[in-house]
Amino acid sequence: MAYVSMGEAHRRVTEFLSRFSDSVFSQNGSSLKQLFSVSSNSSSLLSLADALNVFQDSNRLIKQSDTYSQLGEILVPLLRSLQSYRNGNLVDAYTSFEKSANVFLQEFRNWESAWAMEAMYVMAYEIRVLAERADRELASVGKNPEKLKGAGSFLMKVFGALAGKGPKRIGALYVTCQLFKVYFKLGTVHLCRSVIRSIETARIFDFEEFPVRDKVTYMYYTGRLEVYNENFVVADQKLTYALIHCNPRSEANIRMILKYLIPVKLSIGILPTSWLLKKYSLLEYENVVQALKRGDLRLLRHALQEHEDRFLRSGVYLVLEKLELQVYQRLIKKIYIFQKQKDPSKAHQVKLEVIVKALKWLGMDMDVDEVECIVAILIHKNLVKGYFAHRSKVAVLSKQDPFPKLNGKPVNS
Amino acid sequence: MASESKVTAEDTKIDLFEDDDEFEEFEIDEEWDNKQEGKEEVTQQWEDDWDDDDVNDDFSVQLKKELDSNSEKS
């Protein structure tokens, strides 16, 4: 840390205070937002923090000035947060920031216009990020990491201040996305429901009016929720929206969208090209796709096993496991095509024993009864059209469209 | 041994607060041209008509061979 003289320290602190009060009184949101960016490590905030370590009397400076003292309840804890952050005391940085943010929120509610929206965005972002770092610090000394949960409660208050009628509504989606990030990290995704309801049922505000960056983030997270709930048609719509509107330069985000969109598409019978898998290095899906194309059950099981950990962590394992039925469908269709090539008149009679043999070749030991059970499920789910000639252990396939395609619809449940 | 298990316990505790797929933050003033080139590519990389009657791939050929040979035996 470079040496800072007392005079220089005093100058930096005064400069910050006057920039802050100027921004508030002239209602300059974009200037104000920079002063709240505690975690940005901007050079001006770092040099201010160094100055605060030298000049210990900033609180008195605030109290003595008529202008600054009006903002004292925001400024005093904000300066402390900046200083604590610089000194690596992250729990105190968070706690102080939350104090400042609470008072700022009260002021923000009273302002009629949305001039301070950008500052509010920064505040919402900072509170989340500072809480995450504070929790890491708490966990590392064996204490209960509870700050992120607190940040979630604060963000709900912010949401409440924005979600009503009026010009501030435009910011509600940004805060919603910060809340999603908190809830997904804490594993309390059920708490997303009430904000989603508030966003989606509002008639006073058209979703399309929100900024595109928030719409994309929102669709990504709600799309993921729909994947967990196995609403594949809605998940497809939301994740596709995110994909279409995402910043094309943001490859990491596009990759994350695809990570969820691919299993969704697979479950409704649509495959990604291998170009896509390579371009976004999602090669864990390569064998899954190959298994579907071939009707190769062994390959599907192998692919699921190989990437089990990854698929379980992202929560798509169960979605992929259910692809098995489509793979069975494909395998039986191949047998049917072979038979058609040999003797079209007998093609629609598939002996269960032949399926048993095909599975055995794939290393799967199943008897005729088990195979009958699987074919019954395929018929029930409309992946196969036909019936059993029970005594002769033959599946009699419909002569018309014996293997209906999903065409973008999920398998019947 | 005791210290080892403590480390694992801490790891799992921190691990609880992770979402591997946290969406990267867009800048507050970030804007983009949605019609940029390259975008088309990503949204058109899907095949819905892959389930054809083609059985000339290696897997199918081998499967057919297997089924034929077995049926001769039985």
Image: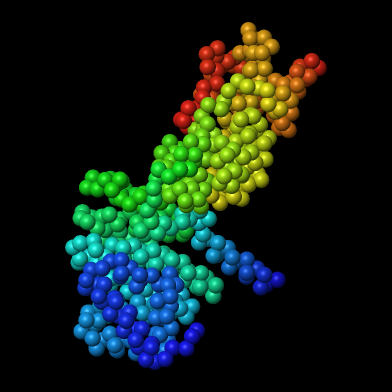
Q: Horizontally, is A359 left or right of A101 in the view?
A: right
- Looking at this view, name the residue that lies furthest to the bottom: A6
Which residue is depicted at the point 28% across and 80% down? A18
Q: Position of residue A352 (x, y in %)?
A: 66, 20
Residue A391 in picture, x, y percent from top left: 64, 14
- Residue B5: where, in percent of width, then height? 65, 68
Instruction: Describe residue A196's horizontal placement relative to residue A28 as left or right.
Output: right
Query: On the rendered structure, is A53 left or right of A377?
Result: left
Which residue corresponds to the image point at 36% horizontal and 65% vertical from the top-left?
Answer: A122
| Colouring chosen for the image of the structure | rainbow
- Residue at the location (44% across, 88% down)? A4
Rendering quarter of residue A114: bottom left
Answer above or below: position of A382 versus A100. above
Residue A267 visible: no
Q: How many marks?
A: 0
**Which quarter of the figure has residue A44?**
bottom left
Quick check: A255 above or below A237? below
Quick check: can you spot residue A285? yes
Residue A335 drawn above or below residue A409:
above
Q: Residue furthest top?
A: A345
Q: Residue furthest right?
A: B73
Q: Position of residue A388 (x, y in %)?
A: 59, 16
Q: Nearer the viewer, residue A32 or A351?
A: A32
At x 67%, y 72%, the residue is B2
Compared across the picture, whether A274 is left or right of A222 comes to right
Please identify the residue farthest to the front as the structure is shown: B37
Closer to the camera, A157 or A50? Answer: A50
